[in-house]
Image (tube, rainbow, N blue to C red):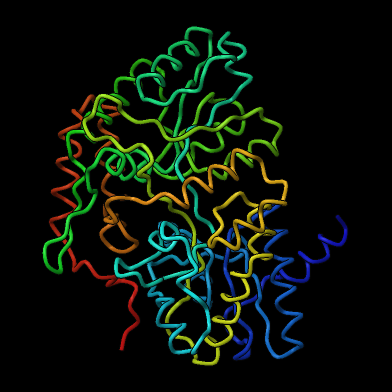
Amino acid sequence: MLRKFIFSLLAVALVSATGVSAQEIVLRHDLKGEALDAFATLTLRFNDGLKGRGRILLQDVHGVGIDERRVLPHLALLDPDDSMEFFGTRPRFQPLHELLRNAKSPLNVAAFYPPVKEAVGDGSGRLLALPLGLNWPVLLVNRAALKKAGVAEQKLPSTWWEVQKLAGQLYDSGHTCPLTSSRFSWLHLENIASQHGESAVKRSGKTEHVAINSLVNVKHLALLASWQKSRYFHYAGAAREGDARFLSGECAMLTGESSIYLAARRTHIDADMTDLPYYDDVYGVRPDDIVPDGAGLWALAGHKKEDYALIARFMAFMMQAEVQKSWVKATGFLPMTPAGLSALQEAQLPTRLLDGAQKRLTAQRKDNSRLRHGPLRDRLHAILGEEIAFVWNADRAAKDALDSTVRRVNGASLPAATVALRPKK
């Protein structure tokens, strides 16, 4: 433990993004706990291999002042949804495929699992970032809460109607928060659409539009609104606010990211995990057609050629099977490649996570359209939060809220390509 602590001190020292040499790469993050220890140790290993010819310096975003955050680092491990928190702005990123091409990197992009590559791709099979922090959507359940409700032996729900029944049983037993959620748009719009044969985004030439007001999306939001009134469902916020309510034991169920299962076990919550529920009364439903998502290692635009060469080496290092094994074991995130998944077989990862990862990574989605990182998705998440607040608080109809969201987001549609991610020429 002491050795790990020393590693963290060596690797996580806060640095300013100004005044560093060309071969000192600043990597901004918001990691903590086991994830931070693992990443710091791996970074130190990489730095040792450089033998003084360069290094990666970790910078905790929470230790950087608001004004200082505008001084952009070379790299950031983040979900682009969190760009404002990380940088105080939405910066330009250097697409990974361009970075690797310019650095003549031997990184084998074909080695990635298709769902992983798709999550940080540009729609043409080209990577925009290294997908280090991906999750799949799941339903998490606190077993202690089920035991208290007298339904501990009950099969975990697979449909939303079964979730409703279980939420009612929990509420009747005195549980004040049967269900909450995190990452609302990704879970309850994008994945619901994908599971039920709808596309969350539609393209016309070079323009893309959101299409999250389909019948199944309206049906689902209306159901959640009815649960909110019945106190079965508690909306915690658009981002990850629901995680803390589940991990504290306040809420009995959480629709959230798969890695929270590992976090729950480490906080001594007797948690169980099952697939994201679906509607069995919708024709052509494909429950396994989910879209993984989460954090990636993103390169910021505007740095020197030699900096990107060192970044490319670090990306290749993080893809090594044994490195993936250490990282995924500490975090519960999805491995990136078959070699990484194979290395995890002896890593004592919880069976639920290992089996779930294998199932999700080898599944083939029938429709590869998805909302990709960029201005359209940013607008959707911002506007959706405003519109559905009236669903929870003012009895606004789900259809009205989603129709209004679509009109507002598409009213300023941009070209479908990754406009915000391309560096200026």
Residue 383 lies, with reference to residue 389, above or below; the image says below
Q: Looking at the image, which residue is at 62% across and 31% down?
A: 248
Residue 84 appearing in the image: no
Q: Position of residue 115 (x, y in %)?
A: 41, 56
Q: Position of residue 418 (x, y in %)?
A: 29, 70
Q: Tell me: 54 left or right of 410.
A: right
Q: Looking at the image, which residue is at 56% across and 81% down?
A: 311
Q: Position of residue 351 (x, y in %)?
A: 64, 39
Q: 167 or 344: which is nearer to us? A: 344
Q: Position of residue 70 (x, y in %)?
A: 47, 72
Residue 175 appearing in the image: yes
Residue 99 lies, with reference to residue 330, above or below; the image says below
Residue 230 lies, with reference to residue 383, above or below; the image says above
- Picture quarter containing residue 119? bottom left
| Quarter containing the N terminus | bottom right
- Picture quarter containing residue 377? bottom left
Q: 98 or 182: which is nearer to us? A: 98
- Picture quarter containing residue 181? top left
